[in-house]
Amino acid sequence: MKLKFYVFFILLLVSSNLWAYGSSSSSKSCTKPEFSQFIPAENSTIAAGASFSFLASANTYPTTIKVTVKGLPVELSITPKDAAGFLVKGTLPKSLHDDFARISINAEGQKNCKGDGGWLVNIAK
């Protein structure tokens, strides 16, 4: 009788450890920040110094959002937008003109997840 109890107890410990392993590994998953609703639209022709905006997902840490255009940093205005995330606004550098440029976004989210994105615009003369 004691042997059956010990076997049952050992099996119970082993199975609980397996459940714990499965749940802890899934809690470490990473959800990268996402970016959407780009204005102006991709491949649009816009003037130098024009404004742009996009939406950053709710899991984005707003203080980590960085935007560059052709390697030049852009000053940003970031405001919460309900549960949808953050509305990010900026202005293209006036020094860029008559060229295509990528508006590049980098940010961090929960659990040190890094996300990037962006879109291409045509800057007029």
Image (spheres, helix red, strand yellow):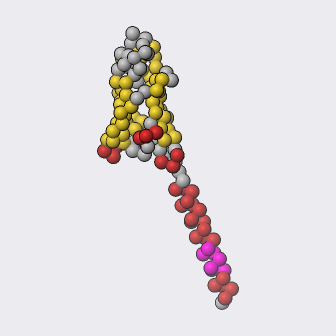
Residue 11 location, x and y as percent?
A: 63, 75
Q: Residue at x 35, y 33 (%)?
A: 77
Q: Image height check: is 72 above or below 110? A: above
Q: Is residue 83 left or right of residue 11?
A: left
Q: Tell me if residue 101 is in the magenta stretch.
A: no
- Give the quarter of the figure containing the C terminus: top left
Q: Residue at x 36, y 40 (%)?
A: 86
Q: Image height check: is 89 above or below 112? A: above
Residue 44 location, x and y as percent?
A: 38, 19
Q: Main secondary structure of the magenta part?
A: helix
Hey, which quadrant is residue 124 in on the image?
top left
- Give the quarter of the figure containing the N terminus: bottom right
Q: Is residue 116 left or right of residue 12?
A: left
Q: Image height check: is 39 above or below 17? A: above
Asked if residue 43 can be seen in this view, the reply is no
Hey, which quadrant is residue 37 in on the image?
top left
Q: Residue at x 60, y 75 (%)?
A: 12
| Residue projecting furthest to the bottom | 1
Hey, which quadrant is residue 80 in on the image?
top left
Q: Which residues are magenta?
A: 7-13
Residue 55 location, x and y as percent?
A: 37, 36
Asked if residue 86 can be seen in this view, the reply is yes
Q: Residue at x 32, y 41 (%)?
A: 81
